[in-house]
Amino acid sequence: MSQMKRLQDILRNLRFGETAAFLPALLENAETNDDTHATFLMNVMEYEQKRREEKKIERHLKWATFPYHKTLEKFNLGEQNSLSQKQFNKLKELIWIEQLYNLILLGPPGVGKTHLAIGLGMKAIYQGYKVIFTTMGALVQTLKTEEVTRKSQTKMKRIRNADLVIIDDLMFMAMNQSEANLLFHLINDLYNTASIILTSNKAPKEWGELLGDPAITTAILDRILHRVEIIHLNGDSYRMKHRKSIFEQESVTN
C-alpha cells in the first residue's frame, strides 16, 4: 500500500473524509508554496473544518424543505411600501430569532410573502440556525399522520427541534376541531423555544372563522402574538403590542 493511500485511510478512520479525498491537492499546494509543517497542518485542519461547515449547511438546506431557493438579495424591496431599508436590515440581522419573536407576513398572492420568508430562512441557516419550511396544508396532514408514519414523525421532530419554523399560506383553508387542536399543541410546543414566520392573506382577526373553535383560536393567537412583528406587504407595517387590538375588549386567558 502506498504512503498516500495509507494516509487517506487513516484520515477516513479519523472521520476526515473530505480531507482524505483532497489530500493530493493539499500536498501539492504545500510543496509548491514550500510550506512549513505547521502551515501544512493548519491548511489541512482549516480545509476539513470548512468542508464540514459547508456539508452541514447543505444538509440543513435539504432538511428545510424549501420549495425553491431565493435569497434576500433578490427580494425587491423597492416594491414594498411597508418595509424601509432600515427595517429590512433589522430583519436580516436575525436578532429577532434570538429574542423568540414571530413574524406574520400578510398580503395578497404575489407580493413576495413566501420569497421574504424563504430568504430569511436561508439567511438563518447560513448563520447556524435550524430552519424548516412547510405549507399549512402539508403541516396539517403531517400532524394528522404523525402517530402512524415514520416520515411524519421525522418531519415533526425536525419542526419541534428547529430554531425557526416557517408556515406558508396559514389559514388558506378551514380546519375541523381536531385539526385546530393539533395546530394549537404544535404552537404551544414551539412557544418560548422557536420563532415562527407565518404567511397569510388573512389578518389574525379573521383566523377564528377558519379555526372554528373560539377557545382554540384564542389560545393560538395568545401564543403567537405575545412577541410578534406583523408586516403588511404592500401596506402598512405595525407591531402588535396589545392583544386587545385583535380581541377588542375581550380578555385573553392562557
Image (cartoon, rainbow, N blue to C red):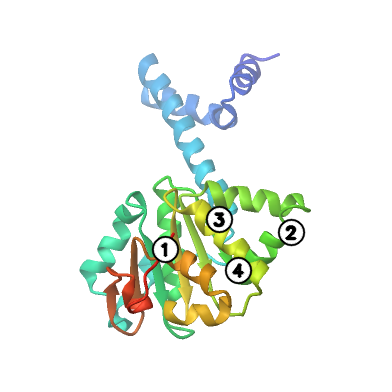
Position above or below: 198 against 207: above
The residue positioned farthest toward the right in the image shown = 148
Please state which of the two labelled residues, at mark 3 or mark 2, is closer to the viewer: 2
Residue picked out by circle 1: 253
Does 22 sit above or below residue 222? above
Task: Say which of 7 and 142 sits in front.
Answer: 142
- Pointer 3 residue: 64
Q: Which residue is mark 4?
A: 180
The answer to which of marks 1 and 2 sits earlier in the sequence is 2
For marks 1 and 4 on the same chain, the one whose residue lies earlier in the sequence: 4
Discs 4/2, front: 4
For discs 1 and 3, the disc positioned in front in the rendered view: 1
Q: What separation in Å lies between label 3 and label 2 (alpha carbons)?
A: 19 Å
Q: Name which residue type carries label 1.
A: Thr
- Could you tell me the amino acid type at mark 3? Ala
Q: Earlier in the sequence, mark 3 or mark 2?
A: 3
- Could you say which disc has been placed on residue 125 in the image? none
Left or right relative to 147: residue 223 = left
Closer to the eye: label 1 or 2: 1
